[in-house]
Image (cartoon, rainbow, N blue to C red):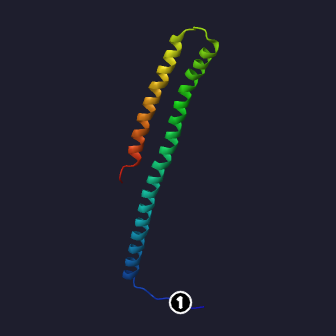
Amino acid sequence: MVKKKKVKLSAKEEKVIEKRLRHRLYERAKRGGGAFRGEFKKQALTAISAALGFLIALSWREPLSDGVKVLVDKIGTSGELLMYQFLSAVIVTILCVVGLVILTRWSSEKK
């Protein structure tokens, strides 16, 4: 085992070393903050994309279900309701896709 000698430093030398240490800690914290920001964007994009995909799926559930009912029943029930449901699903899909495009661009912005 090697023993290290304790060296006495002057007050001026101690201040210089303390200043360097603070600067080093500051730089590490700054890098860590940037990494956190990038990871936060990535995770937020994933969560919001999943939510929008789920919204798209939910908007198509009812019109598809009713469409199948209409085909199975072969009864000319009010097709107007079905048309509005499909139109609503198309509009929600378009809005969600536009939202995903915007989020993707936001997440890929340079820091």
> In terms of depth relative to the viewer, which is nearer, 75 or 104?
75
> In terms of depth relative to the viewer, which is nearer, 13 or 37?
37
- Quarter in which the N terminus is drawn: bottom right
Rendered location of residue 56, percent (x, y): 51, 31
> In terms of depth relative to the viewer, which is nearer, 1 or 78?
78
Q: Is residue 80 above or below residue 29?
A: above
Rendered location of residue 63, percent (x, y): 55, 21
> In terms of depth relative to the viewer, which is nearer, 103 or 15?
103
Which amino acid type corresponds to the residue marked 1 in the rendered image? Lys
* Residue 92 left/right relative to 73: left
Secondary structure at numbered mark 1: loop
* Residue 101 left/right relative to 47: left
* Residue 84 left/right relative to 10: right
At horizontal 44% and vertical 34% (from top left) the residue drawn is 97
Q: How many marks?
A: 1
- Quarter in which the C terminus is drawn: bottom left
Rendered location of residue 45, percent (x, y): 47, 44
- The residue that mark 1 highlights is 4
At horizontal 45% and vertical 88% (from top left) the residue drawn is 8
At horizontal 46% and vertical 89% (from top left) the residue drawn is 7
At horizontal 42% and vertical 85% (from top left) the residue drawn is 9
Rendered location of residue 22, percent (x, y): 41, 70
Q: Is residue 79 above or below residue 110?
A: above
Q: Is residue 66 above or below residue 20?
A: above
Location of residue 34 by image quarter: bottom left
Q: Is residue 110 above or below residue 15?
A: above
Q: Residues within 10 Å of mark 1 (few under 14, many from 20)?
A: few
Location of residue 11 by image quarter: bottom left
